[in-house]
Image (cartoon, helix red, strand yellow):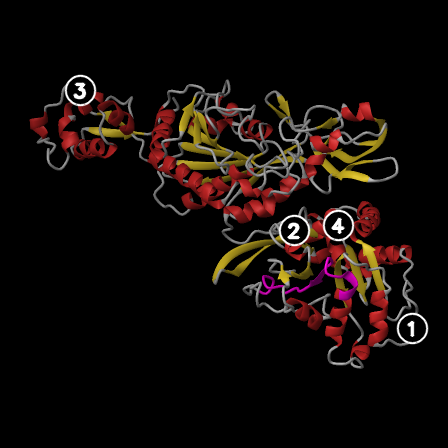
Amino acid sequence: MPVKESSLTLSKFIERLASSGLRAGDTVFVQLSWPAAEQETWVDDANDRILSALLEIIGPNGTLLVPAFTFSFYGHEAFDRASSPAVAGSSTDAVGFSELVRNHAGAVRSDDPLYSVVGIGAAAEELLSNLPNSSVGPNSLMDRLTRRSAKLCLAGVGLERAVLFDFAEDACSAPWRFKKLFTGKAWRNGVHQRQGWIASVVNTELAEKASEIRKRVAARCEAALNLKQDDVYPVVVADARDLLAMLGVELGHEVKAFGPVPKHGGVSVELPPSASMSETISALWRLPRDIVSDGYDTALHALAGQVRMQIHEYPTGTECWSWLIPEKWTCRDARLETLDGHVLFSYRDNPLHAVSYSLPFDGVVSRDELFGHLHTHPRLDDAIPFIFKYYERDWGLCCSKKLKDSLKDEQYRVLIDSEFSFGSLKVGECVARGASDQTFVLCAHLCHPAMVNDDLSGVVVGMQVMQELLKRQDLKYTYRFLILPETIGSVAYLSHNMHLVPQMVGGLFLEMLGVDNPHALQLSFDGNTEMDRCLSRVLSNSSPDAWIGAFRTVVGNDERQFNGPGVRVPMLSLSRVLRERTNGWPYYPEYHSSQDTPELAPESRLAESRDLVLGMIDAVEKSEIPVNLFQGELFCSRYGLHIDAYSNPEGNRSFFDILFLIDGTRSVHEIARVCGISVEAVRSVLNELSTRGLIAYAPLPRA
């Protein structure tokens, strides 16, 4: 440990670095700060000498990383990885040192527009490239450093100001922190590109309390590290993994003792106005969105800021037909440890490590008993599966098959710190009103933690569809978009809104719309309604690879509740799945696993699905039923009816076929299909009949 000094010189400071525990080949993240009075006595090349000393200590096989924060998106400024200067190295100090490293030959810089880091050395490119667009969480820089057991060097910086502290607070779900999406422009290949980035920020209403906690935790950890509080200039080197574990334990005590967070100032996620589908996914996908949970509520409230939305609440225990609304489930932690305390995996790393709605458990179990509760993915050896036991009373953990296969000890310790409590299931409803109360229903589920295509992809597509419909002033039908927890959400909504069911002419469930598969349309229970025919026509014209399947042969989701006995709303479903499924894949390889990530749902594919849904809605808007106001064969000469063969050759050729099909049972599209001509040709004929008062139009029937 550093020796107490009455004063500090540059040479003594460099000596401290040399004796701090750093070794050749180390990967080290350095935070520097020093008293202004001391710095004034140092020579002009002090930063150069410090950098040279550090590089000499870690050698050519080592890697040096330093903060080069810009806070660009905080201040609504464009970020340029190549030229944006560091405004802070460690909170407010050592900017000159950060700039020196940034401008060093061969230096690499991360793309983070808030908390960028620069590096020199063997592993700099690997550590700072291809980061997720988040400053915290899995595969972020701090996560990479801890998994690598890199070293942290705090020189003149108290532990309270360590960057790792922010990561530790986020990792343990500190209630005074929340993830926030920042958006802005970043220079890429000479042009500005829109970018979103997630950071962990402190709730301002809880900032004072959070600061007090941070000081207490830092003091306890510094005591454990034998730091002398009266050291003039401490230099501390610690293993990032060990320090994170220490912080996690201490913060865990504080989190447990924190108490309830006021509802008006609770954890939230903020989305920018008119957030893109990718921005929304980036902000929401990692949330623990179990069917009744804080994570689900956080996501729904964030979405409610994007469109006009009513949030319906159904309290725990409410009867919904034959169903009951379940309890709220909260999981604070779930982990598997060896008996000597080594953590093999944790819920804080990924919420899929705990079976959704697992019972709490704390104890030592045999390997055989553990394996009866430890779930793996049936096809992906590296993936964590999504397992849920909403209505079963059991405990369970999940991990990759590779990790499970490596477990050879006779006993393990299991901790699942979960809680069941009274809560409320929430359904978001967005309505775009049309001239008629006849309603078309869009639906997607928001549950399933830490996954994207199933079914956050359906949610973001539905959101953009509704944003477009809310702009229109000439809608014929009314459109409702329901965002809900799978199955139980539809049951809750329908059972409490049966008065709306007679007005529902049809609907479309949206799911799995980001994967690279062709679109598939699953028909309603009846399969032969006007809604089935209408949407099928649009899909068939959209792509040669698109395909159509009967009810419950493509996917199985909330469309079942709308088509169910006593309801019978002809709701279809739109997804992206293969017609022929090989190797046992149910829908796509990453289904129900930790590998269902944003990379599988690029904006371009989501936009294709959105445009297809809007095309289907345009077809619904035009799907009127012409009703004859005449009987028998029409006396055309009396009304001067003649369809010009040059302007409408199809209509001229099929004129009498069209007349005989108008009986109030077929839509415009169906008449066009039977006649084998275009919808436009039929509509032109119908316009002639309508202007003479010979037909009227009726809305689409339920069946």
The image shows residue 429, relative to residue 195, as above or below, that is: above
What residue would you read off at disc 2? 179
Which tag, 1 or 3, sits closer to the chain's start?
1
The image shows residue 76, relative to residue 686, as above or below, that is: below
Of 572 and 127, nearer the camera is 127
- For marks 4 and 3, the one nearer the N-term is 4
Question: Observer-nearest residue: 697 or 369?
Answer: 369
Q: Can you give x and y, in whole percent of width and height, for residue 463 in the image? A: 49, 42
Observer-side mark, 4 or 3, equals: 4
Q: Which residue is mark 4?
A: 146
CA gap between label 1 and label 2 equals 41 Å
Which badge, 2 or 4, comes first in the chain's sequence?
4
**Which numbered mark, 3 or 2, is in the foreground of this view?**
2
Q: Which residue is mark 3?
A: 631
Secondary element at image label 2:
strand
What residue sits right under mark 1 in the picture? 5
Task: Please report the bounds of the magenta region as a residue range.
Answer: 56-75
Specify which label sits upstream in the sequence, 1 or 2: 1
